[in-house]
Amino acid sequence: GPRQVLIRGVRLTINAPSTGKDLERDLSRFETRSDDVYVVSFPKSGTTWVQEIVWQILNDGRISEERVESRYPFLEKSQLFDRPGDESDGQKVSVTSRPSPRLIKSHLPYHVIPMSKEESKRSKYIYVARNPKDVAVSFYHFVQSFDPGSYFNGTWEFFVKLFLEGKNSYGFWCDHVVPWWKHRDEPHVLFLTYEGLKKDLSGNVRLISEFLEKPLSDEVIRKITHQCTFAEMKKNSNSYVISAYATKPNLLRKGQIGDWKSLFSEELNKQFEETFLTKLHGTGLHFDTE
Ligand code: PPS
């Protein structure tokens, strides 16, 4: 089951195949490639959405029949290296054995994610952030979608108390988002927001295609923009599931800005403003929470 691990000073709760020490060691010997594309986020911030956009950009607007989770290994929950014996039955499953270009999903913080110091080996990292109020609501519904008792079956009040204390899988929300934001101008990092994607999807599709050095015609940009709206992705909802936890699709729910209002009291709103949003003052990062 999930366990707490301390990696490079960052405390995470990870349901990984290896223990904390192994994971730290594996991550440090994991070799990134210059053509890897990482889609990174604090959970429930629009990861799947960006994963789909990136996939379609790299595939000229084609929609895949494969689930998003098989197109994108989930870095910290995957086997990173082949084990002895894996080869004998032709079953190479590790991230290392994947052919290039690899697409990888991760929720790891900036200081934990594998990133080559050598310019020539440095991969591309697309980070997506979402306002913490909607993240909390989305996260709560997500954990409710698992088998009762397998992950979390407490109340919203209890869930959100832990969230405010940073006691959830990937720690305190600000500690995740702000370091990535500070590195946003590095050439191998693209920082996006969920709210920005909602506001101008086609502009963001173009931005991502330029970042990936995969120029597309206006027509293909239009096509991808249409295919990556919430309603269109929902038509394919069987592709969007994390099967290790849930048996039914659970990565597309409402797809809106401002759903926090459905669960927040005035008091809780104040707590979120104080705990998270005022901490962004001076960073230049701003969320339109509606
Ligand atoms: S995970 O488990 O961390 O990978 O989840 P993640 O994909 O980051 O977040 C899931 C939320 O993103 C919403 N989503 C979308 N919103 C708008 N448009 C599109 N196309 C889209 N695709 C996914 C999804 O509905 C979850 O948010 P909520 O608020 O729960 O609906």
Image (tube, rainbow, N blue to C red):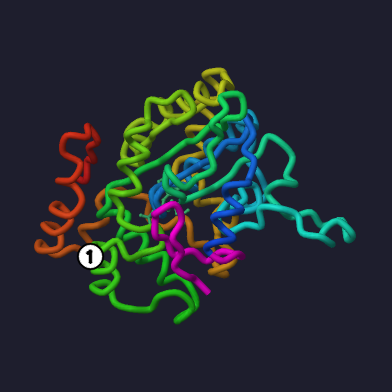
Q: Residue at x 54, y 69 (%)?
A: 245
Q: Residue at x 44, y 68 (%)?
A: 4
Q: Amino acid at mark 1?
A: Leu
Q: Which residues are magenta?
A: 1-19
Tell me if residue 111 comes above or below residue 117 in the rendering: below
Coordinates of residue 135 in the picture (x, y in percent): 32, 54
Tell me if residue 265 is in the magenta stretch.
no
Tell me if residue 67 comes above or below residue 141 in the rendering: above
Tell me if residue 249 comes above or below residue 185 in the rendering: below
Few, some or many residues within 10 Å of mark 1 (<14, 14–19, 20+)? some
Q: Residue at x 57, y 28 (%)?
A: 118
Which image quarter holds the C terminus?
A: top left
Furthest residue toward right: 88
Tell me if residue 243 comes above or below residue 208 in the rendering: below
Coordinates of residue 210 in the picture (x, y in percent): 51, 21
Image side of residue 200 versus residue 230, left or right: left
Q: Residue at x 60, y 50 (%)?
A: 68
Tell me if residue 15 is in the magenta stretch.
yes
Coordinates of residue 124 in the picture (x, y in percent): 53, 32
